[in-house]
Image: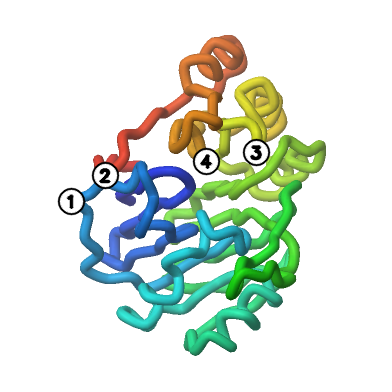
């Protein structure tokens, strides 16, 4: 599988089948978005919560490619009202299959208000996803969250080989909390996200790497727009 970080909390996964999964799409106005990146297809969009930096471009991309859109029920209901087709509303603990990937919704410790016409409307709760692929590997995509004790249940249930965690602090956990999350999840590798986009997001991968040096989890820092294979 090819993983491309598109800056902040946005990721593109290109599967061996050629299908593309887009996580938390924020492209327009994202300071960290790689300017040369272009989408040639999108088969599934998965949204962890309704804050603008995770959902901003879901509607225009959905209109262009007509993908399935996976999100918590209330966020899907809002997208439905905006004319988005093929939504797959779900809730925590549930699973749906899209693009040959099983998406299981997990908890997250965060808020989920959707900015709509200058008002904040209810978007359900923030969530994360465990993605399970045809080769039986599992990836935990945390979305925006603080560390929480039930991450150990994610490890017990799904045994993720890779975790993608926010580390920027202020709106999510910082490196100290992310280091504890790594110890609970016990994933061999983790990719940090949601850092450095703005000066206020001060957490850095180097700081996290020092904190987890003896834990058995390797910190895999990506460069926006540069695909890697996993």
The colour scheme applied to this rendered structure is: rainbow
Q: 181 or 156, which lies in front?
A: 181
Q: Earlier in the sequence, mark 3 or mark 1?
A: 1
Spot occupied by residue 89 in the image (x, y as percentages of width and height):
64, 78
Quarter of the image for residue 93 reads bottom right
**Numbered badge on residue 36:** 1
Q: Residue furthest left?
A: 36
Please tell me which residue is depicted at 73% across the width and 43% down the height of the picture: 156
Q: Are marks 1 and 4 in contact (CB under 8 Å)?
A: no
Q: Residue furthest right?
A: 149
Q: 55 or 149, which lies in front?
A: 55
Spot occupied by residue 121 in the image (x, y as percentages of width and height):
71, 72
The answer to whether residue 111 of the structure is visible from this angle is yes
Provide the residue designation for mark 2.
225
Circle 3 SS class: loop
Q: CA distance from mark 1 to mark 2?
A: 8 Å
Provide the residue designation for mark 3.
172
Circle 4 SS class: strand
């Amino acid at each position: 599988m090819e993983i491309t970080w598109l800056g902040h909390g946005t990721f593109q996964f290109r599967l061996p089948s050629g299908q593309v999964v887009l996580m938390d799409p924020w492209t327009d106005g994202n300071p960290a978005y790689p300017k040369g990146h272009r989408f040639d297809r999108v088969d599934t969009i998965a949204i962890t919560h309704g804050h603008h930096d995770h959902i901003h471009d879901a509607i225009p991309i959905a209109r262009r490619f007509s993908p399935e859109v996976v999100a918590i029920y209330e966020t899907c209901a809002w997208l439905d009202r905006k004319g988005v087709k093929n939504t797959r509303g779900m809730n925590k603990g549930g699973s749906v299959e899209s693009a040959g990937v099983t998406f299981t919704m997990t908890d997250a410790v965060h808020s989920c208000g959707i900015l709509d016409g200058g008002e904040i409307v209810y978007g359900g709760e923030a969530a994360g996803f465990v993605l399970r692929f045809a080769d039986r590997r599992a990836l935990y995509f945390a979305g925006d969250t603080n560390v929480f004790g039930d991450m150990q249940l994610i490890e017990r249930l799904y045994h993720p080989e890779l975790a993608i965690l926010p580390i920027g602090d202020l709106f999510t956990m910082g490196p100290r909390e992310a280091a504890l999350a790594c110890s609970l999840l016990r994933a061999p590798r983790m990719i940090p996200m949601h850092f450095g986009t703005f000066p206020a997001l001060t957490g850095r991968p180097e700081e996290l790497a020092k904190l987890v040096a003896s834990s058995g989890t390797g910190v895999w820092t990506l460069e926006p727009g540069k695909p890697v294979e996993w």
